[in-house]
Image (tube, rainbow, N blue to C red):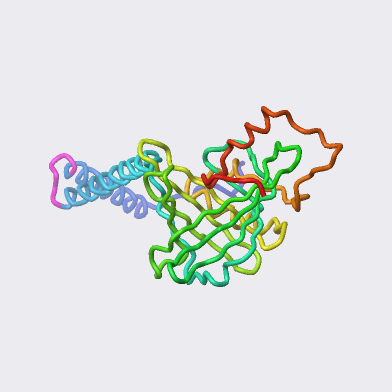
Amino acid sequence: MWPLVGRARPESSGETSRARSSQLVRLLANESESECIVKMCPGTRRRSGFRWSAVTLLVIGLLVGDTAGVWKRREDKTKCPKVKGIRNFDISEFLGSWYIVQYYASSEEALAYRCMRAELSVSPENAEVTMNFTYSFTDDPINELLVGNITWKIPSSDLPAHWTHAELSYEGVYNTYVLDSDYKSWALLMHCAEKSESPRYLSSFIMSREASLGANVISYLREKLPRYDIDLEYMFPMDQKQCNKTNNSEDMLIPTLTSVRRSHIRRHPLKRKHRRQ
């Protein structure tokens, strides 16, 4: 004999009748709903219309998303991205000496510079910012220090973190933005220049008041750059060791005349002529 647990309880005739009645009601309801679907009863029409509206909105949303993706992929690489400089920027606190500890340029796939340092000053009379800088080439065996400078105008006193510079090598404007800074320790600069029928030129400096900067701060500043189409794979650390003077020791192997001439025609990433210090 099967155990009592799990056995169905015998139904009385009243319960059987009620169950059959309920089943019949459900069948009739289903049949009625099927007829409404075929005949498009008013209530069904509203429910069906709601379902079609939901499907339509979903399709439109997908199409808009795909279109936005296409627009993003078709970004004009000849124009500078829209950049916002640091808010409430105090340029007087920003001036002085800086070490460039990381460097990026869209035109370069390897770092060609070392010992890059900058001195920033401002001319209040004509709202100009001047950067005097020193640097060496990584492949220079005598570590020759080169110097250069670039001057920007501050086009709007309301936006002191945006500077512009015009030079002959660019038909458009050379824009520089201070993206972030705590003034005392670190800063992040970004440059963008346009030239007709040519890709835009992007560069960026992570700067420090000391020769080195903490890895967490560098990571924090690097994360701000990809939104401006800067590829962090090509943002390189800048060597700041043994940078004080040119090595003129007598036992140093002097490069050939050809290599010296070639080094003199190379240009600084800021596109300014350089000279020996």
* Side (left or right) of 202 relative to 263: left
Magenta residues span 37-42
Q: Position of residue 183 (x, y in %)?
A: 60, 68
* Side (left or right) of 131 relative to 99: left
Q: Looking at the picture, tell me which residue is in the foreground, 245 or 231.
A: 245
At 72% from the left and 48% from the top, the residue drawn is 239
Q: Position of residue 20 (x, y in %)?
A: 31, 48
* Side (left or right) of 227 relative to 145: left
Q: Looking at the picture, tell me which residue is in the foreground, 271 or 14.
A: 271
Q: Looking at the picture, tell me which residue is in the foreground, 55 or 255.
A: 255
- State whether residue 61 is above or below residue 265: below
Q: Quadrant of the N terminus?
A: top right
Tally of marks: 0
Is the stretch drawn in magenta largely helix, strand or loop?
Answer: helix
Q: Is residue 128 magenta?
A: no
Q: Position of residue 152 (x, y in %)?
A: 46, 58
Q: Looking at the picture, tell me which residue is in the foreground, 270 or 221.
A: 270
- State whether residue 113 is above or below residue 158: above
